[in-house]
Amino acid sequence: MTAGETVRGLVELTRPVNVIAASVLTFIGAFVAGGDLAQFDVVAAVAATGLAVGAGNAINDYFDREIDRINQPDRAIPRGAVSPRTALVFSVFLFGMAVALALMLPWQALAIAAINLVALVAYTEFFKGLPGVGNALVAYLVGSTFLFGAAAVERIEPSVVLFVLAAIATLTREIVKDVEDVEGDREEGLNTLPIAIGERRALQVAAALLVVGVLASPVPYVLGYFGIAYLVLVVPADAIMVYAAYESFDDPTAGQSKLKYGMFLAALAFVVGRAVLAFGVT
């Protein structure tokens, strides 16, 4: 492999789209909390999130390298663009940079970063194949990006509800994704929730969780964190996600894809709702 192919492989290990998405959620957490978005702590928190997510994805590929040789042979390690040792060193380097930035943040943000670091490293090796546990851990990690951004500006309270809503939506999608992947997971010996309790029952659990999230979605408006524009956007986001959960019973692939779109629209609702309120419109 050439140096260029190795660099490309290292970038692939980080999952750039996931890195950007997680960084944006941290930024939204700081924005919703009403922090000064130009301050160093916000910039450091956003960068630390991106580095940690990239490191977590790289270490995930390191641990999954044997499985990926069968199921994902085009990934960087199986195709030989990056050696397992290089992937491990790269992951440790990214984690080190993330920790260095986190150490400069307020103690609440540092505590969240420490918990998330342990969770990221432990996910693939210990929790990924446990029924529901791996799903819940991923849901926590996604939701905690809001907490982390808010903690960076030392106003964590407004982001708690967003954390819960994002975690519920993510947990729903993770369960549906496991239903989509049930055949491959069974062959790999994983004991995911659909394998443990059945596909239909797992989808029922996912749908019930989503209903709880939808019913709770007006809470940020009621508490005064967002303006009316939040409701204008979150209602169609809720509708998309409810339909996606229903569709998942017939087509999990299409359902989890629509859930992602609904989650993006909900994140936009957070931003617009806060922005409108900041300009004095309620």
Image: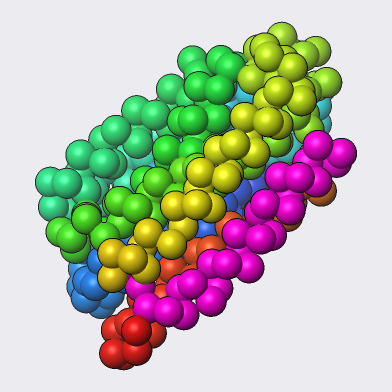
Percent position of residue 227, x then y = 37, 78
Percent position of residue 252, x then y = 80, 39
Vertical placement of 109 versus 202: above or below?
below
Which quadrant does the N terminus fall into? Answer: top right
Can the viewer see residue 190?
A: no
Q: Residue at point 35% right, 73% down?
A: 226
Q: Nearer the viewer, residue 152 or 259?
A: 259
Percent position of residue 268, x then y = 51, 70
Rendering quarter of residue 84? top right
Q: Residue furthest left?
A: 107
Q: Residue furthest right?
A: 250
Q: Residue at point 27% right, 75% down?
A: 37
Vertical placement of 36 versus 156: above or below?
below
Which quadrant does the C terminus fall into? Answer: bottom left
In the rendered image, residue 239 lying in the magenta stretch gets the answer yes
**Majority secondary structure in the magenta region:** helix
Q: Residue at point 29% right, 90% down?
A: 280
Q: Residue at point 62% right, 29% down?
A: 205
Q: Nearer the viewer, residue 168 or 232?
A: 232
Rendering quarter of residue 149? bottom left
Q: Nearer the viewer, residue 107 or 146?
A: 146
Percent position of residue 14, x then y = 55, 46
In the rendered image, residue 260 lying in the magenta stretch gets the answer no
Residue segment shown in magenta: 225-251
